[in-house]
Image: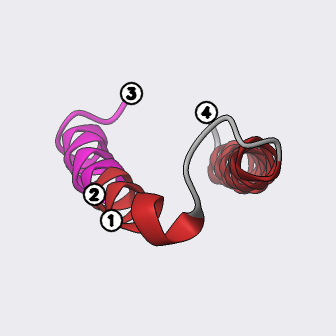
Amino acid sequence: MTNMENKGQEERSGMMIGGLIVLGIGILFLLINLGIIPGFKVIWPIIMIIVGLALIIGSFSRSKKDQFPG
């Protein structure tokens, strides 16, 4: 893969992740408004834990890609 193709693939991946984050936040607020899950005061620590774990896992997957290009 050329450098330009790789950059385009990374850009699409970033857009998809951003879209999924916005979608997830929208679903979260909808569920809170419908009373299905408790309010934001109760759930924000869980959100912080999930975001932290996602960042840690993402950093591990990026470091593996850097070690084994292909």
Badge 2 or badge 4: first in the primary sequence: 4
Relative to 40, 41 lies left or right: left
Please name the residue that numbered disc 3 is placed on.
70
Badge 3 or badge 4: first in the primary sequence: 4
Query: Residue 5 in the image: x percent, y percent?
Result: 73, 43
Q: Main secondary structure of the magenta part?
A: helix
Q: Which mark is residue 45?
A: 1
Badge 3 or badge 1: first in the primary sequence: 1
Q: Secondary structure at mark 2?
A: helix
Residues 29 and 33: in front is: 33
- For the point 67% across and 44% down, the residue is 13
Identified by mark 3, the residue type is Gly
Please name the residue that numbered disc 4 is placed on.
1
Select label 2 or label 4 by which is in front: 2
Badge 3 or badge 2: first in the primary sequence: 2
In the figure, 34 relative to 63: above or below? above
In the image, the segment drawn in magenta is: 53-70
Select label 3 or label 2 by which is in front: 2
Q: Which mark is residue 49?
A: 2
Rate crowding at label 2 as few (under 14), some (14 to 19) or many (20 or more) other CA atoms within 10 Å: few
The quadrant of the picture occupied by the C terminus is top left
Tell me whether the residue at label 2 lies in contact with that at label 1, contact meaning CB atoms closer than 8 angstroms. Answer: yes
Identified by mark 1, the residue type is Pro
